[in-house]
Image (tube, grey):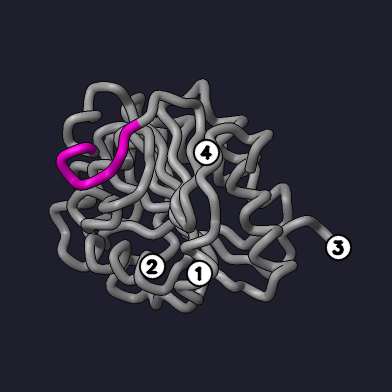
Amino acid sequence: MSQLTGKTVAVLVEDLYQDLEVWYPLLRLREAGARVVTVGTGRARSYKSKTGYEVLEDMPVTKVKVEQFDAIVVPGGYAPDILRRYPDMVDFVRQVNARGRLIASICHGAWLLCSADVLRGKTATCFFAIKDDVVNAGARYVDEEVVRDRNLITSRKPEDLPAFMATLIQALVEQRDEGDPTQTESHSRHRRVSRTAREA
């Protein structure tokens, strides 16, 4: 059995996404056996990256349900600034957090998390230019390649992708082995913050 057989992960997409931050997680998760669904705003059938590379939208956010997914990935680029203009997308991220499902955000992906108000009281990282946004959204910012705090996993930039994905995959494996205890508040409270893939 593959590492992530039976797991379903949403990758959030829109125009001007950062190529590596969509395709590296998407392909790595599929390689590990997960079902990966690209979820967009619904305004187009496909979206172009900052370099013009297209990604197809599998489902619009208006058609998805939180319980379908074990985790979501929020890539960077300028896409998050478009994603957060859609109330259905912001509400989806908010509901994912409320259910204790995993949220993995890299680079400018934290813009969407700020709008969904899911950073308050957590330790996180992001691209350095939006540090103030993250702090003002109530998070404690640290400059590390990957930070895991309860159901939240964050990284800074494309170079962090190996550690980012190692931490997300490990969290999904733990979720499977423990019978998805992320649904309980008590479990999320005792989950320690880890700042590197080795510590996750």
Q: Which residues are magenta?
A: 135-141
N-terminal of the pair, mark 4 or mark 3, is 3
Residue, disc 1:
69
Question: Was residue 42 drawn as part of the magenta stretch in this picture?
Answer: no
Residue, disc 3:
1
- How many C-alpha atoms fall within 10 Å of the one at disc 1: few (<14), some, or many (≥20)? some
Mark 2 to mark 4 CA distance (whole Å): 22 Å
Mark 4, mark 3: which one is toward the viewer?
3
Q: Amino acid at mark 2?
A: Val
* Quarter occupied by the C terminus: top right
N-terminal of the pair, mark 3 or mark 2, is 3
Q: Amino acid at mark 3?
A: Met
Q: Amino acid at mark 1?
A: Phe
Residue, disc 4:
23
* Quarter occupied by the N terminus: bottom right
Q: Position of residue 175 (x, y in %)?
A: 64, 65
- How many C-alpha atoms fall within 10 Å of the one at disc 3: few (<14), some, or many (≥20)? few
Q: Is residue 196 visible?
A: yes
Residue, disc 2:
96
Mark 4 to mark 3 CA distance (whole Å): 23 Å
Q: Residue furthest right?
A: 1
